[in-house]
Amino acid sequence: METVSTSRAHGGTQGVYRHASAATATDMTFSVFVPDHAAGAKLPVVWYLSGLTCTHANVTEKGEFRAACAELGLIFVAPDTSPRGDGVPDDPAGAYDFGLGAGFYVDATEAPYAANYRMWRYVTEELPTLVAAGFPADMDRQSIMGHSMGGHGALTIGLTFPDRYRAVSAFAPIVAPSRVPWGEKALAGYLGPDRAAWAKHDAVALIEGGARVPALLVDQGEADNFLAEQLQPQLLATACEAAGIPLTLRMQPGYDHSYNFISTFMADHLRWHAARLK
């Protein structure tokens, strides 16, 4: 693991790191914030998965999480959203919603994406092993959150591994990718046309199939221009109600899809996570 940069912030260290990934067969970059509380102790870990077009840098620079993480004693880890580098295939038309910056947190099975686009394995297996070895992380106390495409990733990973992640939350998540244009394009491109293979990467389908978590927290801006077509949080609300999963869905008037929205409610989410990571 190579240290790209470190700097002091809020009584802690914000670092950016790079390593050669076996999962993606590329170099991968991620960021980690470690509060000084960690001196001589291990701290719980919050994973943050970013959305379409993002890298680790978006939340690192604009997420405004460090003050709350320092107060609460949380390590904050932000991976990239896709493999990158020479030879990594992109959307043939150069669209923003598939390929580079749009890995959708799945392990692709379709050519030519299967060789590199293994973000599920990267986020759930390889990167946690690296973080456990390189940072003062208590891997018995993990939680996961994300935004948009990353909200989709956080929900599906949290629902798949409920014993690993003690808390799951999301900002403006894609809750049912099998039913919206972003998800239909991505899941077909990465996993092929068989919709049965998509179900394990669809939060609503997972819940309808029996997956359970103790509770979910979701914030959604009412002025989000992707709300009606791509996000549809009401589908998650219906699924959670039928399954008996307590869902706190907060519709926020006037807020859009941007990091102005995310940063406003970031500390709320981190406190919600911290209460479940004690």
Image (spheres, helix red, strand yellow):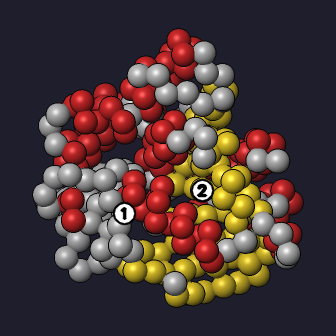
Q: State the SS at label 2.
A: strand
Q: Which residue is mark 1?
A: 82
Q: Out of 99 and 129, give the one closest to the viewer.
A: 129
Above or below residue 140? Residue 90 is below
In the rendered image, residue 260, in percent from the top left (x then y), is placed at: 62, 52
The first of marks 1 and 2 along the sequence is 2
Quadrant housing residue 91: bottom left
Quadrant housing residue 62: bottom right
Identified at 76% across, 81% down, the residue is 8
Identified at 31% across, 53% down, the residue is 107
Q: State the SS at label 1.
A: loop
In the rendered image, residue 131, in percent from the top left (x then y), is placed at: 59, 70
Q: CA distance from mark 1 to mark 2?
A: 16 Å
Q: Amino acid at mark 1?
A: Ser
Q: Which residue is mark 2?
A: 47
Above or below residue 55? Residue 216 is above
Q: Is any atom of residue 104 visible in this view?
A: yes
Quadrant housing residue 6: bottom right
Identified at 82% across, 61% down, the residue is 73
Q: Amino acid at mark 2?
A: Trp
